[in-house]
Image (spheres, grey):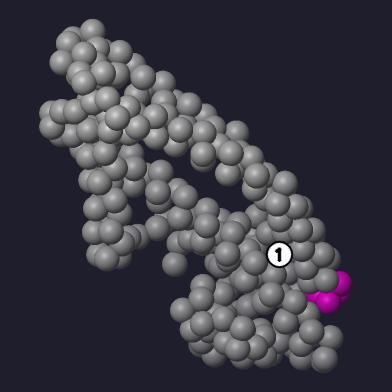
């Protein structure tokens, strides 16, 4: 699996497509009250899926990083118990099956590496391939250092211990940032919904008040400008609260 590529299942495709159609309908009704606007905004489903795919890829990579940390901690314990690196991977695979479901990415990866080693492929090559497909700096760095240490007779236990320490520190830092930003993220989401709530309130309480905004060229132009500003503000807010470590 290439972890930088996300493929939607048929069920996901239908669910997200339905969500966009519903969103498109709400926007068209609130900002334009026009079926033509609904049709004009339909091609935006392409951008919607691009954004959604990027978000799902990042979520999958974050989960894989956490799983990889657990995996190399198990490998470290097996190495300290006297296992060879290859057997340490096999032992850690058994423990990972107890910690995660069979469909978990790290379980499938370790099972695949174990199967490949039984076909005489070396562990260093498999880890490098895993790092390349994951596109995660932590896994890539670990695989490269593991390859160097394995071929030059380096201290694998010390290398894995240092890798575990580095990844754990990054995870702890990210969790602290997410905890500190949780309130701000909630505020940003609420502020993003306030204009929509105001429009809904006005349409329910005094629908004739907005007629001029939907029936005159100037009004439609103003609503279009408001929608563009609202969209820009939403994405700007999302970029502000998104912090990567």
| Residue under the point 52% across and 53% down | 58
Occupied quadrant, residue 164:
bottom right
Q: Is residue 158 magenta?
A: yes
Residue 148 visible in rendering: no
Q: Is residue 161 above or below residue 223?
A: below
Occupied quadrant, residue 73:
bottom right
Occupied quadrant, residue 141:
bottom right
| Residue under the point 26% across and 39% down | 26
Choose between 158 and 203: the one closer to the eye: 203
Sort mark 1 into few (<14), some (14-19) or many (20+) by Cα contacts within 10 Å: many
Q: Residue furthest left?
A: 36
| Residue under the point 65% across and 88% down | 95
In-image side of 189 versus 167 (left or right): left
Q: Is residue 213 above or below residue 165?
A: above
User: Horizontal and vertical percent for residue 46?
Assistant: 28, 41
Choose between 230 and 120: the one closer to the eye: 230
In-image side of 223 versus 4 (left or right): left
The residue singled out by tag 1 in the image is 142
User: Horizontal and vertical percent for residue 107?
Assistant: 54, 80
User: Horizontal and vertical percent for residue 123?
Assistant: 63, 78
Q: Is residue 24 above or below residue 141?
A: above
Q: Magenta span covers which residues?
A: 154-159
Residue 89 visible in rendering: yes
Q: Residue furthest front?
A: 205
Tell me the chief SS of the magenta region.
Answer: helix
Quarter of the picture containing the N terminus is bottom left
Choose between 64 and 111: the one closer to the eye: 64
Choose between 176 and 195: the one closer to the eye: 195
Query: Is disc 1 placed on a helix, strand or loop?
Result: helix
Q: Is residue 28 above or below residue 50?
A: above
Q: Is residue 130 magenta?
A: no
User: Horizontal and vertical percent for residue 60?
Assistant: 51, 61
């Amino acid at each position: 699996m290439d972890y930088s590529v996300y493929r939607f299942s048929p069920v996901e495709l239908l669910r997200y497509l339905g969500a966009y159609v519903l969103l498109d309908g709400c926007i068209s009704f609130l900002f334009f009250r026009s079926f033509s606007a609904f049709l004009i905004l339909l091609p935006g489903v392409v951008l919607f899926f691009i954004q959604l795919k990027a978000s799902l890829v990042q979520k999958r990579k974050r989960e894989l990083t956490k799983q990889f940390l657990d995996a190399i901690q198990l490998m470290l314990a097996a190495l300290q118990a006297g296992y060879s690196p290859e057997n340490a991977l096999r032992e850690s695979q058994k423990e990972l099956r107890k910690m995660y479901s069979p469909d978990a990415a790290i379980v499938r990866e370790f099972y695949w590496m174990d199967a490949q080693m039984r076909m005489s492929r070396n562990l260093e090559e498999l880890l490098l391939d895993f790092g390349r497909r994951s596109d995660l700096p932590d896994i890539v760095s670990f695989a490269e250092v593991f390859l160097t240490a394995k071929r030059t007779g380096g201290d694998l236990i010390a290398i894995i211990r240092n890798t575990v320490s580095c990844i754990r520190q990054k995870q702890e830092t990210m969790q602290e940032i997410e905890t500190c930003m949780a309130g701000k993220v909630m505020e940003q989401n609420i502020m993003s919904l306030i204009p929509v709530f105001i429009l809904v309130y006005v349409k329910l309480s005094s629908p004739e008040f907005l007629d001029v905004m939907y029936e005159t060229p100037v009004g439609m132009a103003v609503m279009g400008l408001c929608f563009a500003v609202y969209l820009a503000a939403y994405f700007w807010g999302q970029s502000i609260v998104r912090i990567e470590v």
